[in-house]
Amino acid sequence: MNEDQVRKARKQLLRELPDPTEILRGSLLDRRIFHRRGCRKCRRGEGHRVWVLTVGYPGGRTRQFTVPAEHKGQVQRWLRNYRKLRAKLEAICELNHELLRADL
């Protein structure tokens, strides 16, 4: 690719970036919780479905957030946006490497 093509590709990637206010890092897990006593559903072995967002931090620490069922779709979309943003940023970095090599 010549320099103009690299710059054009970079601008295209920039236009494709998701809204940075709608990103979320982590993993969405489907879990079942069971009460110890007093709940017929749990006694039958069905349990209660909950969605949990798990986020890892340096040092091996993790945080978990319970996600209400009505927010599941939004959380999934924000997680996809994060992955898309990260992939696009990596592609932009690769193009910038090409520009640096062209200048040297």
Image (cartoon, rainbow, N blue to C red):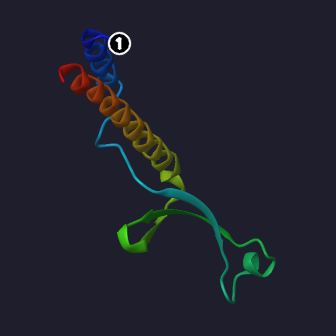
Image quadrant assignment for residue 15: top left
- Identify which residue is drawn at 34% across, 24% down: 13
Query: For this rendering, which residue is in front, 36 or 26?
Result: 26
Which residue does the numbered mark 1 point to in the structure image?
1
Expressed as whole percent of the image width and height from the top left, the position of residue 59 reads: 38, 73
- Identify which residue is drawn at 51% across, 46% down: 73
Q: Answer left or right for 69 relative to 21.
A: right
Expressed as whole percent of the image width and height from the top left, the position of residue 38 reads: 69, 87
Vertical placement of 86 versus 47: above or below? Answer: above
Quadrant location of the N terminus? top left
Image quadrant assignment for residue 45: bottom right
Q: Which amino acid does label 1 sit on?
A: Met
- Identify which residue is drawn at 78% across, 82% down: 43
Vertical placement of 82 versus 49: above or below? Answer: above
Expressed as whole percent of the image width and height from the top left, the position of residue 77 reads: 47, 42
Q: Residue furthest front?
A: 104
